[in-house]
Image (spheres, rainbow, N blue to C red):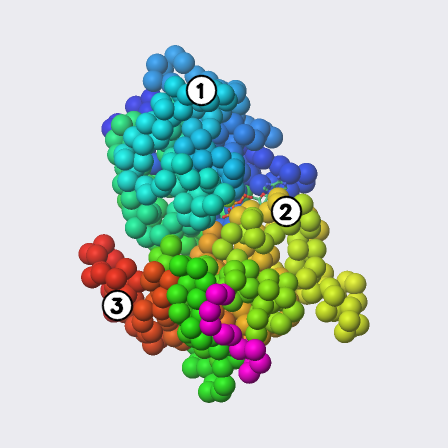
Amino acid sequence: MPDSHAAEHVHIDVRDVNVSFGAFAALDQVSVRIRRGRVHALVGENGAGKSTLGKVISGHLPATRGQVTLHRENPAEVLGSAGHLRARVAVVDQELALLPARSVAENVLLGSLPSRFGVALRAAMRSRVATLLEATGFDLDPDAPVGALRVADRQLVTILRAFATQAEVIVMDEPTAALTGRESERLLGVIDRMRADGRTFVYVSHFLGEVLEIADDITVLKDGQVTWQGDASATNQDALVAAMLGRSLVTMFPDRQPPPPGDPVLVVENLTSGPEVQDVSLAVRPGEILGIAGIVGSGRSELAHTLLGARRATRGTMRLNGQLYRPNGPTHAWNRGVRIVPESRRDQGLFLRHTVHRNVTLPHLSAVSRAGCLMPGAGRTMAADLLDRMDYRGSGVDIPVGSLSGGNQQKVLLARCLLSDPNVLIIDEPTRGVDVGARHSIYTLIDEAAQRGVAVIVISSELEEVLGLADRVLAMRGGRIVREFAKHASEAAVLSAILGAEPTATRKPSN
Ligand SMILES: Nc1ncnc2c1ncn2[C@@H]1O[C@H](COP(=O)(O)OP(=O)(O)OP(=O)(O)O)[C@@H](O)[C@H]1O
Ligand SMILES: [Mg+2]
């Protein structure tokens, strides 16, 4: 296509946009041309401004300065008001704003249907959702209440909701952060087909491999400014990382020393809880990082909840430092030194209206005041220092957690657990929504905690992460531990264990 014609194909034109929150500029002179029928990826560190730009493009946040225009296919028609944008741009956002008491079908059609559901409408609704499920290949029960779904399935619901609208442009803010490799692949396939039909996508992701696979154009943001922009075929992963961070990353995972020998701190025998956790036995030593790999639905998170007593064990025993351990919930577990960074930060972890400082220090306060050794300001300094080490680029620790970028919220959860050392630290998806630079810092902090003697259990659906970090990996399938792997096992071997099948050709073995 000759360059002089490029303007005709611009679908959304973002010109010199600034967005300020008080004195802080989340976007600074940002210009992006999003072409019709293309996938335009936004990448950058946590807090770089990706979600903010997504909200400006979809008309949900006004630009402080600059303008956003939407070009229709008829070149004479140019629309620019927030209302125009909201009517034509759909968003799949990081926040998973769903109605938990309503069904999958109702949530999917929220926004595309009148608010009262008659009988005829209900039937139409079911068939519309069935068509969408078939077209996407997503495995969801349209009648299930959304509140009962796993995080990954809720993410699929928000994606379907965007597809259900007739929006010309779909902004996807980390749509695959909670999905398995297989589901992500499926989603990319759907996006590819919809792009061929002329839909335009704005795609935000920290998975650069995925970005390079699906995007036509890429914009890199750093501290609210564009640092690189161009054709996806003109760049590669290393160049993107350098543009994102302003430096290159040599290694991702710490070079771990083997953990010291010693007695396990936590010993679990024949633990059973419902059909999701079946006869699980494991032991983890101080200083050891134990990985648990499994696909969504394998019982990984349910196992974690049982270790905290948030789920009742129907059979089996747990011992902590040799003593019988029968937790009756997260607070009880916390007091015994067993802590979790949960999978879903919004539902299970954070008090969004409270400050960062309060979120990090609150569970420590009773212990601290009993010890009588923490001055009021010290907790704040410790929290700020810890967050700094994770490349937290938020605006201090006195703002509400709800106003932080998604990746920074994850860092707050981890900081809470590491403000003082627990006996056992369970981390369910440690780097969900976290940028590559901060990912490296988080792995380093986990490694250091282990070196200080914390027993760490890392649960992740990213095999590379489990294998890169853990000293030993347990493969989980159908609620059971099916195999144990030593460090440096091949990705293909672990994958075949967790799938219970031969590895598919899409993933290369790591060695
Ligand atoms: N409502 C708000 N009030 C104050 N600051 C805000 C608000 N929304 C966003 N910010 C700040 O603007 C900056 C950009 O945030 P944004 O959510 O766009 O980042 P992001 O690139 O999407 O990051 P992530 O990868 O972590 O999702 C952050 O520093 C964030 O704290
Ligand atoms: Mg974001």
**Can you give x and y, in whole percent of width and height, for residue 433 in the image?**
47, 51
Report the front residue among 461 and 440. Answer: 461
Please identify the dominant SS of the magenta region: strand
Residue at horizontal 38 percent and vertical 49 percent from the top: 179
Q: CA distance from mark 3 to mark 2?
A: 40 Å
Which residue in the protein does label 3 denote?
493
Mark 2 → mark 1, Cα distance in angstroms: 36 Å
Local secondary structure at mark 3 = helix
Q: Position of residue 413 (x, y in %)?
A: 58, 58
Q: Which mark is residue 352?
A: 2
Image quadrant in which the C terminus is located = bottom left
The correct choice, above or below, for 187 with respect to 464 in the image is above
For residue 465, above or below residue 117:
below
Is residue 10 rendered to the left or right of residue 396?
Answer: left
State the residue position of label 1: 118
- Gap in angstroms between the C-alphas marked 1 and 3: 51 Å
Residue at figure coordinates x 56%, y 48% from the top left: 346
Mark 1 lies on a secondary structure that is loop
Pick whichever, 367 or 175, lies toward us: 367
Q: Identify which amino acid the numbered label 1 is placed on.
A: Gly
Q: Which residues are magenta?
A: 313-324
- Amino acid type shown at disc 3: Ala
Badge 2 amino acid:
Leu
Q: Earlier in the sequence, mark 1 or mark 3?
A: 1
